[in-house]
Image (cartoon, rainbow, N blue to C red):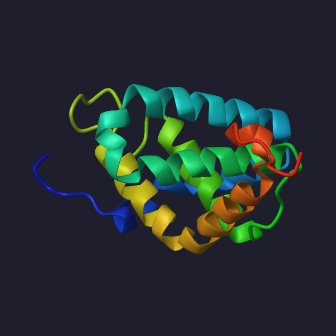
C-alpha cells in the first residue's frame, strides 16, 4: 500500500456514502450524537500523535457537536454540520476504505477525509471558536473581574 490516499478518493468511497447517510440520524438525536463524539474522542486520543496536524480542529469539531447536541450552538449551516458528523462517523467506522485493523495504514484514509472536511468547513469552525471564546466568563478562565 505505497499509494497516498486523497480526501477526494475517500469522499467518493462507499464507506463515506454510508457515513453521510447516517449523519442526519445523528444530527437529529442528541444522545446518539453525544455517544458518537465520545467514541470518536476516545479513538482520537488513542491516536493523537498520528492526528497531530488536525488535532486542534478535530477537537473543536467535537466541542461544536456537543454544543449542537445540547442546543447551545446552532449557527453552523446544516450542510457543514452533516459534513462534520459524516467525517466523525467515518472516523469511528472500523471497516472503511482502509480498515482500521491494518496497523500503520488504517488511519490514512481517516486523516485524509478529516483534513478535506476540516478544510471545507474551516470558516464554520472559526465562527464556533469565536462563539466559544465569547461564552468564556472570568470564572471559566480563572480570572477575577477587577470591578468587584
Disc count in the image?
0
Q: Residue at x 77, y 45 (%)?
A: 138
* Left or right of 147 on screen, residue 142: left
Q: Residue at x 69, y 57 (%)?
A: 133
Q: Residue at x 42, y 42 (%)?
A: 96
Residue 104, image x, y percentages: 21, 33
Please determine whether, in this image, residue 52 is positioned above or below residue 76: above
Residue 15 visible at all:
no
* Left or right of 22 on screen, residue 17: left
Q: Residue at x 51, y 49 (%)?
A: 58
Single out the residue that lies furthest toward the front: 147
Quarter of the picture holding the C terminus? top right
Residue 92 visible at all:
yes
Residue 33, image x, y percentages: 74, 39
- Residue 29 placement: quadrant: top right
Decide which of 2, 145 is in the foreground and name it. 145
Residue 119, image x, y percentages: 46, 69
Please determine whether, in this image, residue 22 is positioned above or below residue 134: above
Residue 45, image x, y percentages: 45, 29
- Residue 40 placement: quadrant: top right
* Left or right of 99 on screen, residue 138: right
* Left or right of 33 on screen, residue 45: left
- Residue 126 placement: quadrant: bottom right
Amino acid at each position: 500500500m505505497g499509494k497516498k490516499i486523497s480526501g477526494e478518493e475517500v469522499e467518493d468511497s462507499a464507506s463515506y456514502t454510508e457515513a453521510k447517510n447516517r449523519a442526519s440520524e445523528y444530527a437529529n438525536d442528541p444522545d446518539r450524537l453525544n455517544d458518537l463524539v465520545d467514541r470518536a474522542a476516545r479513538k482520537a486520543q488513542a491516536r493523537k500523535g498520528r492526528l497531530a496536524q488536525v488535532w486542534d480542529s478535530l477537537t473543536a469539531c467535537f466541542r461544536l457537536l456537543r454544543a449542537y447536541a445540547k442546543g447551545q450552538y446552532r449557527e453552523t449551516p446544516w450542510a457543514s454540520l452533516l459534513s462534520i458528523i459524516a467525517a466523525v462517523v467515518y472516523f469511528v467506522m472500523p471497516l472503511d476504505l482502509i480498515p482500521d485493523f491494518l496497523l500503520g495504514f488504517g488511519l490514512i484514509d481517516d486523516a485524509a477525509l478529516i483534513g478535506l472536511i476540516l478544510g471545507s468547513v474551516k470558516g464554520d469552525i472559526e465562527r464556533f471558536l469565536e462563539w466559544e471564546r465569547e461564552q468564556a466568563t472570568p470564572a471559566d478562565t480563572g480570572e477575577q473581574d477587577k470591578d468587584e
